[in-house]
Amino acid sequence: MFRNILVPTDGSALAGRAVKKAISIARSSGARITVFHVAPPYRSIIYSDYIPPDFVSPSVFEKGTRERVGKLLDAVCRQAKAAGVKASGSYVASDFAADAIVKAAKKHKCDLIAMASHGRSGLSKLLIGSETQKVLAATKIPVLVLR
């Protein structure tokens, strides 16, 4: 049925439900999962002559991101492997999560994207937007949305 399932995760409990469902689908169909995270990119806030006391250099920021995201991806990969499912993880730094998810699905030749949706509605959906909606609009790959 499926060969490779992309599972975007932010480490939240809701994303954890999507991970469990993706592992279950992968186990029953003999697929593998690709765990994916979109991290925020580095931003420095330096004013002409002022460097804030909490300034973090790009290399320190990148190292911290690698460590934090590495733990997240490793935990999900261990969970999949414990269920007998092959798994690998990757991440990118981007301000545009939906675009990064669609690109990752293509890059890893995924035939399903399993992701969580917070189910926002009304004004909060309008103001915040929905990464899930953006993914649905930007891909032809089937998307399993879990709430």
Image (spheres, rainbow, N blue to C red):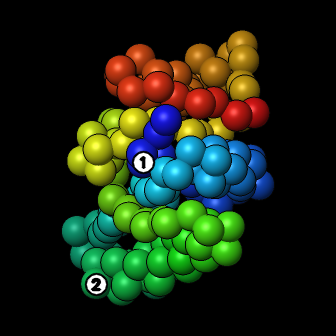
Q: Quadrant of residue 101?
A: top left
In space, the residues marked 2 and 1 are separated at their CA atoms by: 33 Å
Q: Secondary structure at mark 1?
A: strand
Residue depicted at 57% across the width and 50% down the height:
26
Residue depicted at 48% across the width and 65% down the height:
87
What is the x, y in percent for residue 33?
Answer: 49, 55
Amino acid type of the residue tagged 1 in the rendering? Asn
Is residue 59 shown to the viewer in this render? yes
Determine whether 59 is above or below 119 in the image.
below
What is the x, y in percent for residue 59?
Answer: 28, 84
Query: Which residue corresponds to mark 2?
Result: 59
In the image: residue 57, left or right of residue 116: left
What is the x, y in percent for residue 93?
Answer: 34, 59
Q: Earlier in the sequence, mark 2 or mark 1?
A: 1
Residue depicted at 47% across the width and 39% down the height:
2
Determine whether 76 is above or below 25 in the image.
below
In the image: residue 8, left or right of residue 19: left
Determine whether 82 is above or below 41 in the image.
below
Query: Which residue corresponds to mark 1?
Result: 4
Q: Residues within 10 Å of mark 2 (few under 14, many from 20)?
A: few
